[in-house]
Amino acid sequence: MSLNTHNESAIHHVVIIGGGFGGLYAAQKLGKSKVPVKITLIDKRNFHLFQPLLYQVATGSLSPADIASPLRSVLSENKNTSVVMGEVLDIDPQGQVVKLKNHLDIGYDSLIVATGVSHHYFGNDQWSEQAPGLKTIEDAINIRRRILSAFEAAEKTHDRQFKEALMNFVVIGGGPTGVELAGTLAELAHRTLSNEFTNIDTKQARIILIEGTDRVLPPYHADLSEAAKQSLLKLGVEVKTSAMVTNIEDHVVTFKCGEQVEQIQAQTILWAAGVKASAMGKVLGDRLNAELDRVGRVVVQPDMSIANYPNIYVIGDLANYPHQGDRPLPGVAPVAMQQGEYVAHHIEAKVLEREPAKFKYWDFGSLAVIGRHEAVVDFKFLRLKGWLAWFIWTFVHVYYLIEFDNKLIVMIQWGWNYFTHRRGARLITGRYLQVLEEMEGIRAGGLNLEAKETANVA
């Protein structure tokens, strides 16, 4: 079965795979275009997710709906745009067709691929079960369930060693996601929950952040990295840098600091250490002979297209853009937004048979929040930390939320959290009893802190 094939109409048909920042910004720009184009946006989900705030869902500050917007609602005013909920499995570049599950084919004149990245365990995918990453709503709800269930299980047990393991929380990876997770976890345990349990003192919870390089927030200026570390320490986070994780097994994290091997028993282990390209990267490599980097991202041309395929573009986290500066552009939301808008302009220019402009990423700076009144902002020409940086971080994130009701709800929720220190979205849903049974199973099996065979991380 086919849908909207490119030869059914003289109107230029643009197919966009992925409704993240890159895909959505391209669709919005083309949707308002005066050039005769029609757009089909394909995504496995029916919503756009504001990923930079996922960690707040994982720690109970926000609900999933606060940071998600239905794609049909966002694009409803674009009369030239169709939304298809489906999963793309393959691409036929000769026939200019994308192939979806359930035997649905969609033809295109121009194709934009913006499917992002997933977790990367450096060849140790078996770690994913015990150390989940944070990329989707389901990931966030799973992590929230694990965190809150650990406190509930600790409240019930009389086994001192088991309770200690439940009260240990390990975050692996000291980039923005890891720093934000660790800082918010510390505030949750040491402040929000401090008066809510009878048999445990949540202030005794250990939050350990493990980073392989010599400082947290490696892409940031060294002064801001140090400021972030001091903020984490003030919140009670144990920061271990130059520490390479070598194994995760039976809820034991094994890592090396120089020649010293250390182990931490923890029921809750969170992964924020690396990413790899989505499955579409391999599809493009196989079908188009596209060049891929070591984590599977597609190396693109200066106009975001794939070599020898000028009508197929890759944007956002899936793209490796090596044409500006001495390293590829970072996988952050502003890059995807600008690339999405650029490709929309590029397609318009080609339809009008005009010379397209060249892409240039405008870096307005980087932001990371550590906790209440604690953040760092790097504007290149100006570096800030503390309260002012925290205020700027708050304003920027509210500004970039897609819909007005999300902006309003998040502002109200943050205001309530700020004045009360409470987090109203601390719901344990889904497999709650199963999670507790798994935790009880650890105690039944005993806590094994003996040295284990390690596997090197690439």
Image: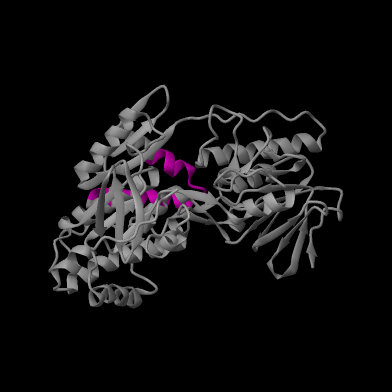
Query: Nearest the camera: 6 or 170?
Result: 170
Whether 395 is among the magenta residues is yes
Residue 387 visible in the picture: no
Q: Is residue 321 left or right of residue 254?
A: right
Q: Residue at x 18, y 74 (%)?
A: 156
Q: Quadrant of the N terminus?
A: bottom right
Residue 3 visible in the picture: yes
Q: Please, is residue 353 above or below residue 292 in the view? A: above
Q: Is residue 54 left or right of residue 211?
A: right
Give the percent coordinates (x, y) of residue 91.
Answer: 73, 56
Q: Residue at x 64, y 30 (%)?
A: 359
Give the percent coordinates (x, y) of residue 354.
Answer: 80, 30
Query: Nearest the camera: 282 or 302?
Result: 282
Magenta-drawn segment: 394-419
Give the percent coordinates (x, y) of residue 124.
Answer: 45, 58
Q: Is residue 17 left or right of residue 142?
A: right
Q: Residue at x 65, y 47 (%)?
A: 27
Query: Nearest the camera: 242 or 428?
Result: 242
Q: Please, is residue 385 above or below residue 23 in the view? A: above
Q: Is residue 3 left or right of residue 404?
A: right
Give the percent coordinates (x, y) of residue 259.
Answer: 27, 44
Whether 451 is among the magenta residues is no
Q: Please, is residue 95 above or below residue 30 in the view? A: below
Quadrant for residue 217, please give it: top left
Q: Residue at x 28, y 68 (%)?
A: 149
